[in-house]
Amino acid sequence: MKNPVERLIEGLLKNDPHKAALICSPQNRRYFTQFPSSAGILLVTAAGAYLLLDSRYAEAGGKKAQYCQVSGYTNLSEKFGEIIRAQGIQQIYMETMRMTVAEARRFEAIFQEHGAEGVLDDSLDSAIRVQRMVKSPEEIAKMEAAQAITDAAFDHILGYIREGVTEREIALEIEFFMRRQGAEGLAFPSIVAAGPQGSQPHAVPSEYPIQKGDMITMDTGAKLDGYNSDMTRTVALGKLSDDKRHVYETVLKAHVEAMKVVRPGVICKSVDKVARDIIDAEYPGTFGHTLGHGVGLDVHEWPGFSTRDETPCEPGMVITDEPGIYLPGQCGVRIEDMVLVTEDGYRSLTHSPKELIEL
């Protein structure tokens, strides 16, 4: 597979020396250059990519950035002018989804000053989305490493959960463990929801103390080398009632059956339908969110297993499978794996047990 810059030059720019692409968002800059920074501009031309960095990052970028030429600057307009004039650039595609109106107007004015036109349609965003949907083997390896930390954190937290410990204490212990294992941070703020709190899919961990008979939903993920993992498991403290056990078994069935249909060519929304039909047959109206989302440099990427996503599955896509049932005032259950689409089906990147655990 060609590197990301080469693919963008061939795909969007069509090797046209009069066209270029301006990439400003941190995640996309990192995707194309492998270099993390809170600021910087990447200008991709038919001749190659130029990572423009100020004095805070120029030295580090020169040592670590890939697939590009790193150039420091003090006056961004002058630096753009040098490249535009040297290569005869006439049109520059811009990221519209991740750029403010003020930023877009600023860049348009700079380009016009040097005889180039800023293109503010969705061409660049669409091209980047298509590239990032399909992960390279290197990207998949990074996500597997991040998920290995998340799996280890789940195993660790099972020995920590006891009566009286709070949701917030569980969330903090998960974060501390992940960081001790080498994670650069959390993929997202951990969700820990116990007992009646579990009916809130994105509950914020509170001072609620875990009690016997509670179900505890933990949605966690580690970030490693820029890439994210995402996993949810629901466990119980003590024996569950038959009613709650049936809720869990229904979610597990929906999760497993949906995963079975994942393979190249299957339309994403049809995977969502498999899980949704199973849940709606017994608990109608309790599964409000989509079945899953893409994962990569962002924890929510493209495509998704949703009722509207017409994207066909392709080898290299990594999408979550996370059905849930949420009963207000009673409990909630969600089970989530990251699923890699392979040439002949799928492979789960998640290895924590899914069967009900009663602590």
Image: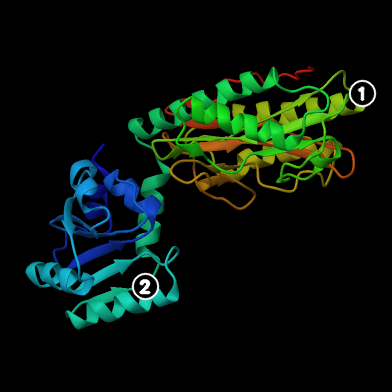
Give the vertical position of 114 relative to 170 (above or below).
below
Asked whether residue 103 is in view, the answer is yes
Residue 124, numbered label: none
> What residue is disc 1 on?
241
Q: Earlier in the sequence, mark 2 or mark 1?
A: 2
Q: Is residue 181 left or right of residue 248?
A: left
How many C-alpha atoms fall within 10 Å of the one at disc 2: few (<14), some, or many (≥20)?
Answer: some
Distance between the alpha carbons at the discs numbered 2 and 1: 57 Å
**Residue 51 quadrant:** bottom left
Q: Is residue 121 left or right of residue 74?
A: right
Specify the farthest residue to the left. 86
Give the vertical position of 284 relative to 230 (above or below).
below
> What residue is disc 2 on?
120
**Residue 218 quadrant:** top right
**Of the two numbered discs 2 and 1 in the rendering, the one whose residue sits closer to the viewer:** 1
Q: Identify which amino acid the numbered label 1 is placed on.
A: Ser
* Contact (Cβ within 8 Å) of mark 2 with mark 1: no
Q: Is residue 105 left or right of residue 62?
A: right
Which is more toward the observer, 335 or 214?
214
Q: Identify which amino acid the numbered label 2 is placed on.
A: Leu
